[in-house]
Image: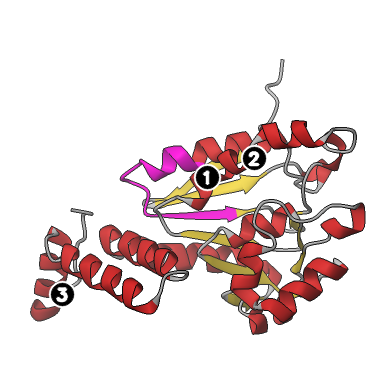
Amino acid sequence: MTEPIPPVLLERPEPGIALLRLNRPQATNALSLELQTLLAGHFAELADNPEVRCIVLTGGDQVFAAGGDIGSMAGVGAIDIYQRHTERLWAPIQHCPKPVIAAVCGYAYGGGCELAMLADLIVAGRSARFAQPEIRIGIMPGIGGTQRLVRAVGKAKAMRMALTGAPISAEEAWVAGLVSEVVDDHQVLAHSLQLARNIAAMPPLAAEQIKEVILAGMDAPLEAALALERKANALLFASRDQKEGMQAFLDKRTPRFEGR
């Protein structure tokens, strides 16, 4: 009997890089509980794997993720939704110490947009569309689509997206600050992997500290955030990679970073 294909696929295209593919094409990659559980498990394992230095998350050539699995929510009540505690499933993604790149083609709607916003970099194809359309079915974003969105694009744009449910284009998302880069659709994955390759070549301790301090400092007072930055910078001077990086610079050679 043929084994069913899981809704999340893990690939290791080259050393230092993990590629996660959402794989429910028949359901436009709707974020079922099974998919979310598998995705959380992969992120938890990759976070602890010292061989992984960067993670790329994609949904495919036609769609990233078209939102939550409405069929599993239509007939349930508030307590059931609360007790699902989907925030626990998303926590390994939110708290992943490794840099994460979302490679987005097509729709990133609802939960798909919220998932993309958990990435540190979003590479969008020109066909990409981002939306929080939950209001159109009588609910609202529930996994970051109001809070992360307003931090990414500001109040005016976030209000328009959340109150109308209307999508924005990849170009609009880039102008608003939601995505990092816009490229042709056929280049999205290759460009994302090249970014991951560049990041994976960097000292992983420095990359993790940069991510941690930027995220922790975003909502902190400036003086507190600057204190975090100073201490993290000083901490890196205890690493072998700092010694290697500076010596390689002086020797005019390519450094070899080990994550120590």
Query: Which residue appears farthest toward the top when viewing the image?
Result: 1
Q: Which mark is residue 86?
A: 2
Q: Which residue is mark 3?
A: 253
Residue in view at x 18 percent, y 64 percent:
236
The image quarter in which residue 136 lies: bottom right
State which tag comes first along the sequence, 3 or 2.
2
Whether residue 166 is visible, yes or no, is: no
Q: Mark 1 against mark 3, which lies toward the viewer? A: 1
Q: Disc 1 designates what residue? A: 91
Residue 110's mark? none
Q: Tag 2: Cα neighbours inside 10 Å, few (<14), some, or many (≥20)?
A: some
Q: Is residue 110 above or below residue 215?
A: above
- Residue 228 appears at what percent x and percent y? 29, 68
Give whichever of discs 1 and 3 has the lower sequence position. Answer: 1
Residues shaded magenta: 43-57
Q: CA distance from mark 1 to mark 2?
A: 9 Å
Horizontal side of residue 70 vs 90, given as left or right: right
